[in-house]
């Protein structure tokens, strides 16, 4: 039996952490939070700042739909399955658009067990809008839905959220068809417009993943973003990347013609009668790379992009540290098999030349594979063409860029050399999550608000706030204007190899490392083979130590011409637990630059810098920092680039861990709006 409940709550005037105790009488005002329905199998708990629907030991899968109550500013779903695993989600019931992204990891290869949370800010939708939550995985879980009645805090709390577009428009039927690109290649486009007179600001998504099924019948990414954003007053335009889906042309994997297509489609959109000339570009992964490809060409109509985990430098993603360790050994082939020669709907394509050129689709550039997979892993013309970092200064659009530090698909190496070099409006949101949208309550608000300000022209206040927002851990949050942080100072830890410790300042001593023999593999982001000889160095941390984008300066000799070196940083907790902070590799033959292949002279001294994957962690006082150094080989199935086994002798006097760090005073307590 369901009961109607009207709940009066007291709301603190000042933002801060959610409190369970009564605030002082002179610091509160009365508001009404209307929980319209309490399910018969749930109980309602209330405090001064929130109302909570509670299901104890409910069977999974669990699903519940509720209207947003008047007075609620934030909603959190929490599911606690004990020691089991559980997945949680929240979405807009009518459009299917997600409202949150769950936290996925606490470190490389470490799945988060126990309670999962998924949360969102209600400013996205008016009261009464129906949202649905879901929990799956474990047999049972304790599930809570918290309705918070307090001001939004953190970065989002400093924005004018009243300026956000609401989903008030009905939609016109989607139109489908081909647009000849700059070279005549036919690109499949889908245009979804709001009802009304227009013209409309536009957001584009250009994807290789839309496939061929039901094209011309169901718009691509309908519940991912198309329907929800179109209802908010945007023209939503989906485009198939050339060579994919039902577009013509060859698969190029971010090549020159594909790049030109992205700028072309921006210009084409801006000239349509339904367009007001202001264009945004949005996506994740490959779909987040196409906005970057457009932005570096600076088309006049492109006002803003949102790039979630984009590939900004293909070399650093596929050959990190000069070691071939990308998504797969034959990444271009992996992308090519996404597509087959397009099955074009009858009557849609009439250009015979385009038909003939498109029938070979993904295999019409046989040079793509060898150019991408030089076994020496040299930065060559193929990668220079796909390096958007060096063109950061050309970008004029406002850039919202996110990357998860633990992303095993697109590496956080995308950050340095790109974000700080952008000259226009920019926002960087990052923290500890995988290949996904940020696991933060305010994520959807920030994304929609970014386009509302820079494409629609509404003043939410982004330009008056810091340009970097980072979650260092579950308790610490930092806002700044650069990352890696220009205000960071270097903390240098030398190596005493004989004693197996890191020391402040210069190190000493020598050590031998047997390199991994051919046939043994190290997968990126996973612990190396522990049977392999390695150097393990420890450092007790006396005070909390922020670790930001570290590097390892290597010095030594090798009894061969080349080898790959792997290093890993781990925080060892006082209770014996641990978490992997970051890892890195270096191809010694590329120690002087990834475009210069220089085999070593056996037994001759060498130096080189091993880049760890950029991250930001706070190593807690009382923990031990553990550095492991060992030989490695590419994380490749076919092993195009095997290391040459041998003995690597490290010079402790020149092998140094360099840790950029900032004072702990740079951090604030984690805002509720920045929690997952």
Image (cartoon, rainbow, N blue to C red):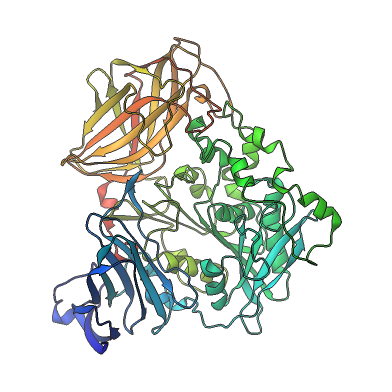
Position of residue 307 in the picture relative to residue 174 (left or right): left
Residue 674, compared with residue 568, is above or below; it is below
Q: Position of residue 216 (x, y in %)?
A: 68, 69
Q: Position of residue 175 (x, y in %)?
A: 69, 73
Count of marks placed on residues: 0
Position of residue 410 in the picture relative to residue 631 (left or right): right
Q: Quadrant of the N terminus?
A: bottom left
Which residue is outermost to the top?
Answer: 603
Note whether residue 362 is visible.
yes
Note whether residue 152 is visible.
no
Residue 499, compared with residue 603, is above or below; it is below
Dividing the picture into quarters, in which one does residue 607 lie?
Answer: top left
Dividing the picture into quarters, in which one does residue 138 lie?
Answer: bottom left
Residue 611, compared with residue 207, is above or below; it is above
Q: Position of residue 507 (x, y in %)?
A: 28, 21
Q: Nearer the viewer, residue 566 or 54?
A: 54
Q: Residue at x 25, y 48 (%)?
A: 664
Which residue is outermost to the right?
Answer: 352
Q: Quadrant of the C terminus?
A: bottom left
Dividing the picture into quarters, in which one does residue 626 lie?
Answer: top left
Q: Nearer the viewer, residue 343 or 295?
A: 343
Q: Position of residue 183 (x, y in %)?
A: 79, 53
Q: Residue at x 32, y 24 (%)?
A: 531
């Amino acid at each position: 039996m369901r009961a109607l409940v009207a709940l009066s709550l007291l709301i603190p005037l000042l933002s801060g952490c959610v409190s369970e105790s009564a605030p002082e009488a002179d610091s509160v005002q009365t508001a009404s939070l209307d929980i319209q329905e309490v399910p018969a199998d749930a109980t309602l708990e209330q405090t001064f700042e929130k109302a909570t629907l509670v299901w104890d030991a409910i069977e999974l899968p669990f699903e519940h739909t509720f209207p947003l109550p008047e007075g609620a500013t934030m909603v959190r779903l929490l599911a606690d399955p004990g020691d089991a695993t559980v997945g949680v989600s929240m979405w807009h019931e009518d459009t299917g658009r997600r409202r949150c992204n769950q936290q996925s990891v606490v470190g490389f290869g470490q799945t988060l067990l126990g309670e999962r949370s998924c949360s969102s800010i209600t400013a996205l939708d008016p009261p009464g809008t129906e949202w649905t939550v879901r929990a799956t995985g474990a047999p049972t879980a304790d599930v809570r839905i918290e309705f918070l009645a307090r001001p939004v805090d953190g970065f989002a709390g400093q924005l004018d959220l009243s300026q956000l577009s609401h989903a008030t428009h009905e939609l016109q039927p989607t139109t489908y068809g081909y647009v000849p690109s700059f070279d005549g290649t036919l690109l499949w486009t889908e245009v979804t417009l709001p009802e009304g007179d227009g013209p409309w600001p536009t957001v584009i998504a250009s994807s290789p993943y839309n496939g061929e099924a039901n094209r011309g019948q169901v718009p691509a990414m309908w519940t991912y973003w198309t329907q929800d954003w179109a209802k908010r007053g945007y023209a939503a335009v989906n485009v198939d990347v050339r060579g994919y889906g039902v577009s013509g042309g060859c698969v190029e994997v971010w090549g020159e013609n594909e790049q030109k297509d992205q700028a072309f489609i921006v210009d084409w959109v801006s000239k349509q009668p339904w367009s007001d000339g202001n264009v945004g570009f949005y996506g994740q992964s490959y779909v987040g790379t196409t906005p970057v490809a457009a932005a570096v060409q600076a088309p006049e109509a492109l006002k803003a992009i949102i790039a979630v985990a984009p590939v900004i430098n293909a070399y650093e993603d596929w050959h990190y540290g000069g070691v071939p360790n990308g998504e797969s050994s034959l990444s271009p082939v992996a992308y090519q098999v996404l597509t087959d020669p397009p099955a074009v709907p009858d009557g849609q394509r009439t250009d015979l030349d385009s038909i003939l050129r498109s029938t070979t689709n993904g295999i019409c550039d046989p040079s793509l594979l060898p150019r991408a997979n030089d076994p020496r892993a040299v930065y060559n013309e193929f990668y220079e063409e796909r390096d958007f970092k060096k063109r950061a200064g050309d970008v004029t659009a406002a850039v919202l860029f996110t990357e998860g530090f633990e992303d095993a698909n697109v590496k956080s190496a995308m950050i340095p050399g790109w974000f700080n070099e952008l000259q226009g409006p920019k926002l960087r949101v990052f923290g500890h999550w995988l290949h996904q949208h940020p696991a933060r309550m305010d994520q959807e608000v920030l994304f929609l608000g970014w386009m509302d300000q820079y494409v629609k022209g509404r003043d939410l206040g982004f330009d008056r706030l810091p340009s970097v927002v980072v979650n260092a851990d579950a308790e610490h949050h930092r806002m700044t204007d650069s990352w890696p942080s220009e205000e960071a100072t270097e903390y240098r830890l030398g190596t005493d190899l004989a004693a197996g410790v890191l020391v402040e300042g210069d190190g000493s001593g020598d050590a031998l490392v047997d390199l991994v023999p051919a046939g043994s593999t190290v997968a990126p982001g996973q612990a190396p083979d522990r049977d392999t000889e390695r150097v393990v160095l420890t450092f007790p941390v006396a005070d909390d130590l922020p670790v930001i984008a570290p590097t390892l300066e290597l010095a030594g000799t090798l009894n061969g011409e080349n080898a790959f070196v792997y290093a890993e940083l781990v925080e060892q907790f006082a209770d014996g637990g641990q978490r992997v902070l970051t890892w890195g590799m270096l191809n010694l033959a590329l120690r002087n630059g990834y475009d210069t292949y220089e085999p070593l002279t056996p037994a001759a001294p060498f130096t080189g810098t091993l880049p760890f994957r950029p991250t930001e962690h706070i190593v807690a006082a009382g923990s031990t920092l553990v550095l492991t150094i060992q030989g490695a080989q590419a994380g490749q199935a076919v092993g195009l680039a095997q290391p040459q086994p041998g003995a690597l002798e490290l010079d402790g006097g020149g092998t140094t861990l360099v840790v950029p760090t900032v004072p702990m005073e740079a951090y604030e307590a984690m805002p509720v709006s920045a929690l997952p």
